[in-house]
Amino acid sequence: KNTMIGTGAWFFFLINLIKVPFHVFIWKTIQLETLILILPVAPLIIGGAFIGVRIVAHIPERPYRFFVILMTTIAAGRLVIPLL
């Protein structure tokens, strides 16, 4: 569980980090006002990460694997048949 979640978190962190210069300099979707607006929420994001780690520790391995496989199957089905 921890390896899968950790790998996914690092992957999306790096992808989003790579996108930041494009958002700032090319698309101009991140501005100083946006950063000032988000700043008060930053502690909640960090707190959510710690809470998430504690929650994952309490989830048994077998139901977690079943849930991941089920959600992957549903997502794949929606890609194949978009009307689902």
Image (cartoon, rainbow, N blue to C red):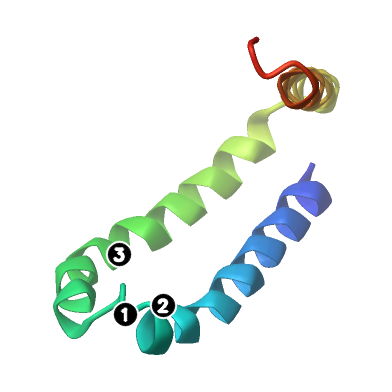
Q: Residues within 10 Å of mark 3 (few under 14, many from 20)?
A: few
In the rendered view, does 81 fall on the left or right side of 36?
A: right
- Residue 18: x and y, percent? 59, 80
Q: Position of residue 51 (x, y in %)?
A: 47, 46
Q: Is residue 15 above or below residue 3?
A: below
User: Which quadrant would residue 14 be assigned to in this image?
Assistant: bottom right
At label 3, which amino acid type do we have? Pro
Disc 2 and disc 3 in contact, CB within 8 angstroms: no
Please give left or right for residue 3 compared with residue 24 in the image.
Answer: right
Q: Residue at x 31, y 73 (%)?
A: 29
**Separation of marks 2 and 3 at Cα, in angstroms:** 23 Å
Question: Which residue is drawn at the image coordinates 31% and 80% (left, top)?
Answer: 28
Mark closest to the chain's N terminus, 1 or 3: 1
The dot on residue 43 is: 3
**Label 1 belongs to which residue?**
28
Circle 2 is placed at which residue position?
23
Image vertical order of residue 26 relative to residue 60, above or below:
below
Residue 79 lies left or right of residue 24; in this view the side is right
Name the amino acid type tagged 2. Answer: His
Q: Quadrant of residue 23?
A: bottom left
